[in-house]
């Protein structure tokens, strides 16, 4: 069996198209393939998460004082450019972002110049349905349309279609460009994405590819991507398969490439994850497949250390020296946190094997105002990710130089927040999908879930934002929690596997 398979490999290597495909993927691990996500998928996820956050912080009370990011000022002090950049955000009465304008300044003595702008439109349910990008035209002295994203939702508020159009300056009309259609199962799990490109000649959408997702007990166990070949056929392309530990933590990811002419799947890479008794991922191993010996060969590994709150404290990466069969240190990222578990620095280093020292590469410092609760912080769409976990006043960025071994100041970020009383009576019609009782509680309480929740993560933090409880549950409608915590106000975040979440408050009295 081994010899016959190697014979097939020898034949395939002689095929130029196949050789080119493997050449494109050479050196890539499963993590690389998995992270190569479609921009249209990422845009859809960004909008979906933003809709969810704005809506489900809205019914915490009928009227609430919100903190909105009014403008983000980036001062680039790199002597090669000296350019300053400013993003200015605006919101409506429900705290939803309505626009962001990007401007730049060549030097403090020069005026600010407009660059581009996004404008956002929402439907009656509060979901963002249109995002239009403009560039400032200095000849015409006005904003000129560039690109448009349009979103369609199902009754559960999940995006079922995303369409991208481009502006035709000659005809002054929108020209369709690409589209994705998403399908979900009864548990709101994404099971299929169809990609289409607009054919201007036939005035029709034409299939360009698809992704299919498989689940077992609410866990995604596999996804397959398909692409259009030279014969205009949609054929398999890449497959990612997941394996899990009994506690549902990911055990491994295996990636494969399909070669349609010979109807076989070829291994690309594999990632294995290992955890400690606290369920923290302390080690990841990456492999490539050795077809000569018909086995997996380790190529990289990452080791992780954690703070008591389970946040990363140090990440170290290694590569495998196959000739010496030893691990070679490559890079390190270290983190520091304040007393409220907010990251205040992250520093990246590269290992200098000649001098046996860590050479600095880049560092970020974050200066945080903890007077604002994270639950009440409305962030603009483009900054909805993990980069902002609290109310930032400003941040500094540094570059590292190996000789002399020091950090050099590079860039400054200044954040400006505006307080606004947001009237949300209209959104109060959106009923929560979970309930908590009793509230107030002595620490023992029950969480009841609607049918929307299948695969659930529960996180409880105190008023300072410090995590004090975390649990994962599946396929149950209610469960009891016994929280050993002092009297005070706490926030409970319940997140479903598809990304939908709610944040509720509970008062503990003892």
Image (cartoon, rainbow, N blue to C red):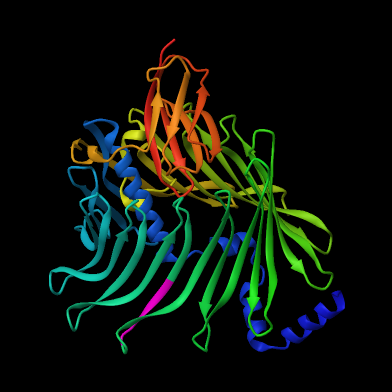
Residue 103 shows in the view: no
Residue 442: say if magenta. Answer: no
Residue 245 shows in the view: yes
Q: Residue at x 43, y 42 (%)?
A: 451
Q: Position of residue 320 (x, y in %)?
A: 75, 58
Furthest residue in direction top, as rendered: 510
Viewer-proximal residue among 84 and 18: 18
Q: Residue at x 65, y 33 (%)?
A: 278
* Quadrant occupied by the C terminus: top left
- Please determine whether, in this image, residue 59 is positioned above or below residue 148: above
Viewer-proximal residue among 293 and 333: 293
Viewer-proximal residue among 287 and 454: 454
Q: Position of residue 231 (x, y in %)?
A: 52, 89
The total number of labels drawn is: 0
Q: Position of residue 128 (x, y in %)?
A: 27, 55
Numbered range of the magenta stretch:
195-200
Q: Residue at x 25, y 30 (%)?
A: 61
- Please determine whether, in this image, residue 355 is positioned above or below residue 336: below
Left or right of residue 156, residue 274 in this image: right
């Amino acid at each position: 069996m081994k010899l016959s398979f190697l014979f097939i490999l020898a034949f395939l290597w002689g095929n130029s198209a196949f050789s080119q495909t493997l050449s494109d993927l050479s050196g890539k691990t499963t993590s690389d393939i998995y992270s190569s996500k479609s921009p249209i998928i990422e845009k859809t996820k960004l909008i979906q998460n933003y809709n969810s956050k704005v809506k489900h912080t809205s019914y915490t009370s009928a009227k609430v004082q919100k903190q909105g990011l009014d403008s983000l000022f980036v001062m680039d002090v790199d002597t090669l450019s000296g350019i300053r950049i400013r993003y200015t955000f605006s919101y409506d009465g429900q705290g939803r972002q309505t626009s962001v304008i990007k401007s730049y300044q060549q030097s403090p003595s020069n005026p600010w110049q407009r660059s581009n702008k996004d404008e956002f439109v929402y439907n009656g349910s509060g979901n963002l349905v249109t995002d239009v990008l403009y560039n400032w035209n200095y000849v015409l002295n006005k904003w000129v349309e560039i690109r448009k994203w349009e979103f369609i939702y199902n009754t559960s508020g999940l995006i079922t279609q995303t369409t991208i159009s481009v502006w035709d300056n000659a005809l002054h009309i929108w020209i369709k460009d690409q589209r994705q259609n998403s399908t979900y199962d009864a548990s709101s799990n994404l099971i299929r994405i169809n990609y289409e490109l607009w054919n201007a000649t036939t005035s029709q959408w034409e299939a360009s590819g698809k992704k299919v997702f498989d689940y077992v007990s609410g866990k995604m166990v596999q996804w397959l991507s398909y692409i259009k070949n030279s014969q205009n056929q949609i054929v398999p392309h890449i497959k990612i398969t997941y394996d899990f530990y009994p506690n549902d933590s990911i055990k491994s990811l295996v990636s494969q490439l399909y070669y349609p002419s010979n109807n076989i799947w070829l291994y690309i890479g594999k990632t294995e994850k290992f955890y400690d008794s606290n369920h923290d991922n302390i080690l990841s191993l990456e492999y490539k497949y050795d077809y000569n010996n018909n086995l997996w060969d380790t190529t990289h590994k990452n080791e992780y250390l954690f703070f008591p709150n389970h946040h990363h404290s140090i990440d170290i990466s290694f590569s495998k020296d196959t000739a010496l069969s030893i691990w070679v240190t490559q890079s390190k990222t270290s983190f520091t946190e304040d007393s409220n578990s907010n990251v205040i620095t992250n520093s990246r280093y590269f290992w200098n094997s000649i001098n046996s020292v860590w050479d600095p590469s880049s560092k970020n410092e974050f200066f945080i105002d903890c007077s604002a609760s994270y639950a009440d912080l409305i962030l603009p769409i483009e900054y909805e990710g993990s980069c902002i976990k609290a109310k930032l006043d400003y941040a500094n960025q540094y570059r590292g130089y190996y000789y002399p071994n020091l950090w050099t100041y590079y860039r400054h970020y200044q954040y400006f927040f505006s307080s606004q009383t947001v009237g949300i009576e209209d959104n109060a019609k959106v009923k929560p999908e979970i309930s908590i009782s009793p509230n107030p509680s002595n620490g023992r309480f029950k969480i009841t879930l609607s049918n929307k929740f299948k695969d659930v993560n529960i996180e409880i933090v105190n008023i300072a934002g410090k995590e004090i409880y975390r649990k994962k549950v599946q396929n149950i409608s209610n469960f009891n929690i016994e929280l050993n915590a002092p009297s005070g106000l706490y926030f409970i975040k319940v997140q479903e596997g598809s990304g939908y979440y709610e944040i509720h408050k509970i008062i503990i009295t003892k």
